[in-house]
């Protein structure tokens, strides 16, 4: 009996300690603007890769000063414009090689936003704040006169997919289409992936978790619920060897979206990991994205 009591106390202590860590450090787990051993500043700029770009400074609706890069395909900025949202770790400079190849393959412009607290942007990251940041970026693009504003496509990877899903849902008139790559169903579900014992206490709407501790999660990013409200076309790009976000998360997102939206496309990449699906996917990856853009962000929209 004493042994059982000790065991229960031990388990209880682990749970309490885990929850305490989650409450105190959750933002540091979800948002990682500075990679270990590196600085917050950009290691390179688009100029290093011979990309034509401009620095764009924005102000979010709550007053936070944000930095971004608008990278042009050509000086005339023709083609669709990709509003790109990065993953949770590092900054936009770490995605420049992918963006360089994206521009080459898709003949598009790319707008790269630094979330608050990332890169040269001020403030501290949070779900409510980053949603405001994304809206500021889209509002800026929608007001530009040097792009075709009817061809703005949101592209989000991992956390960026959660950001992009909210933005797309909130702006059916401004966003033509949405592309998600290796995105999670929710941070609530990811808590159980990172700390397995938490899956009994924290979980999204599609899980059997008791959800007793959902209230302590300040950035739930419930993409599984939000995606059901997106009316625009959605392309799902899933790396089947994703070592961070279980690939079934993407399948769940697709199933939830496709139940109400007939314009959903799902593409799998057998060797794709969390960060390199765009690279290992090769020509198939870029061809899939290009076909989606041709269909759902066509040049003809300019005359409509």
Image: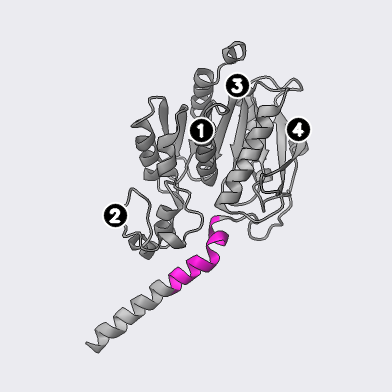
What's the residue at 35%, 80% (across, down)? 10
First in residue order: circle 3 vs circle 4: 4
* Relative horizontal placement of residue 126, taking residue 5 as reference (left or right): right
**How crowded is the residue under tag 4: few (<14 C-alpha within 10 Å), some, or many (20+)?**
some
The quarter of the picture where residue 25 lies is bottom right
The residue at the far front in this view is: 62
Q: How far apart are marks 3 and 4 (CA)?
A: 21 Å
Q: Give the number of the disc on residue 53.
A: 4
The quarter of the picture where residue 74 lies is top right
Residue 98 visible from this viewpoint: yes
Dot 3 and dot 2 residues touching (CB under 8 Å): no
Q: Position of residue 100 (x, y in %)?
A: 66, 33
Judge depth for marks 3 and 1 and give the one in front: 3
* Relative horizontal placement of residue 159, taking residue 267 as reference (left or right): right
For the N terminus, give its image quadrant.
bottom left
Element at badge 1?
strand
Q: Mark 3 points at which residue?
A: 150
First in residue order: circle 1 vs circle 2: 1
What's the residue at 61%, 44% (across, down)? 132
For the C terminus, give its image quadrant.
top right
Q: Name the residue under label 2.
A: 208
* Relative horizontal placement of residue 99, taking residue 57 as reference (left or right): left
Position of residue 278 relative to residue 176, above or below, is below
Judge depth for marks 3 and 4 and give the one in front: 3
Q: Is residue 292 part of the magenta span, yes or no? A: no
Element at badge 3?
helix
First in residue order: circle 4 vs circle 2: 4
Q: Mark 1 points at which residue?
A: 179
Q: Distance between the residues labelled 3 and 1?
A: 16 Å
Position of residue 289 relative to residue 112, above or below, is above
């Amino acid at each position: 009996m004493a042994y059982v009591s000790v065991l229960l106390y031990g388990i209880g202590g682990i749970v309490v300690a885990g929850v305490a860590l989650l409450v105190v450090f959750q933002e540091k787990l979800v948002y990682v603007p500075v990679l270990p051993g590196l600085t917050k500043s950009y290691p390179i700029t688009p100029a290093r890769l011979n990309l034509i770009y401009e620095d764009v400074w924005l102000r979010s609706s709550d007053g936070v000063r944000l930095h971004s890069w608008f990278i042009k395909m050509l000086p005339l900025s023709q083609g669709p414009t990709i509003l790109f949202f990065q993953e949770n770790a590092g900054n936009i400079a770490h995605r420049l090689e992918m963006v360089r190849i994206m521009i080459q393959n898709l003949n598009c412009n790319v707008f790269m936003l630094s979330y608050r607290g990332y890169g040269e942007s001020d403030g501290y990251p949070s779900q409510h704040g980053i949603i405001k940041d994304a809206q500021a970026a889209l509002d800026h693009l929608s007001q530009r006169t040097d792009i075709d504003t009817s061809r703005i496509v949101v592209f989000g990877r991992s956390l960026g997919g959660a950001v992009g899903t909210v933005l797309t849902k909130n702006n059916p008139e401004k966003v033509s289409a949405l592309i998600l790559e290796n995105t999670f169903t929710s941070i609530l579900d990811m808590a159980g992936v990172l700390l397995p014992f938490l899956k009994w206490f924290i979980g999204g709407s599609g899980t059997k978790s008791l959800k007793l501790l959902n209230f302590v999660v300040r950035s739930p990013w419930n993409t599984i619920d939000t995606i059901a409200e997106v009316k625009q076309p959605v392309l799902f790009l899933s790396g089947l060897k994703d070592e961070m976000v279980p690939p079934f998360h993407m399948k769940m997102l697709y199933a939830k979206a496709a139940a109400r939206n007939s314009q959903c496309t799902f593409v799998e990449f057998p060797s794709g990991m969390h960060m390199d699906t765009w690279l290992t996917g090769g020509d198939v990856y870029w061809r899939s994205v290009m076909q989606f853009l041709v269909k759902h962000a066509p040049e003809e929209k300019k005359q409509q």
